[in-house]
Image (cartoon, rainbow, N blue to C red):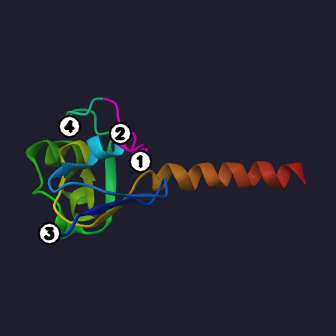
Amino acid sequence: MLVPTVTFQTSGKTIEVEQESNLLRTSIRYEGSVPYKCGGGLCGTCKVRIVEGQDNLSRIMKKEVARLGQDKLDEGYRLACQTFVSGDVTIAWGEEDLARLNKIAQRRINAAQ
């Protein structure tokens, strides 16, 4: 049986996990750095985008539909706390924030020159 791998694209970590491992618990245990507050599908802070391996994940839960909405689900977003892995998957998060922070950082660099 193949061992699934989870690639945390944003933090640059790849780890092997057991079948049906929870994405958020895996991130916490192996320092994958997925942001979170509650871990129970209530707050939505563990929203991740599935870059690859959508078919290797558990079905979408009601809490995900309520918290993310159908548009975000259609774009490939999931709640890490509600998602379980059955094969290789690559996830990313915080692109919106990352892009904004990169622009601010670039402005600071340009201003210092």
Mark 3–mark 4 CB contact (< 8 Å): no
Q: Position of residue 79 (x, y in %)?
A: 25, 47
Residue located 15% across and 49% down the image: 65
- Tell me the kind of residue under disc 1: Gly
Mark 1–mark 4 CB contact (< 8 Å): no
Q: Position of residue 75 (x, y in %)?
A: 28, 64
Nearer to us: label 2 or label 3? 3
Q: Earlier in the sequence, mark 2 or mark 3?
A: 3
Would residue 82 appear left or right of 49 to someone viewing this image? left
Mark 2–mark 1 CB contact (< 8 Å): yes
Q: What residue would you read off at disc 1? A: 32
> Over which residues does the magenta segment extend?
28-37
Would residue 104 appear left or right of 99 to someone viewing this image? right
Q: What residue would you read off at disc 2? A: 28
Q: What residue would you read off at disc 3? A: 1
Disc 2 to disc 1, C-alpha distance: 6 Å
- 32 is within the stretch colored magenta: yes
- Tell me the kind of residue under disc 2: Ile
Q: What residue would you read off at disc 4? A: 41
Residue located 56% across and 56% down the image: 99
Question: How many discs mark residues in the rendered view?
Answer: 4
Residue 33: quarter of image: top left
Disc 2 on helix, strand or loop?
A: helix
Nearer to us: label 1 or label 4? 1
Residue located 22% across and 58% down the image: 73
- Give neighbour class at mark 2: few <14, some 14-19, many 20+ (Cα, 10 Å): few
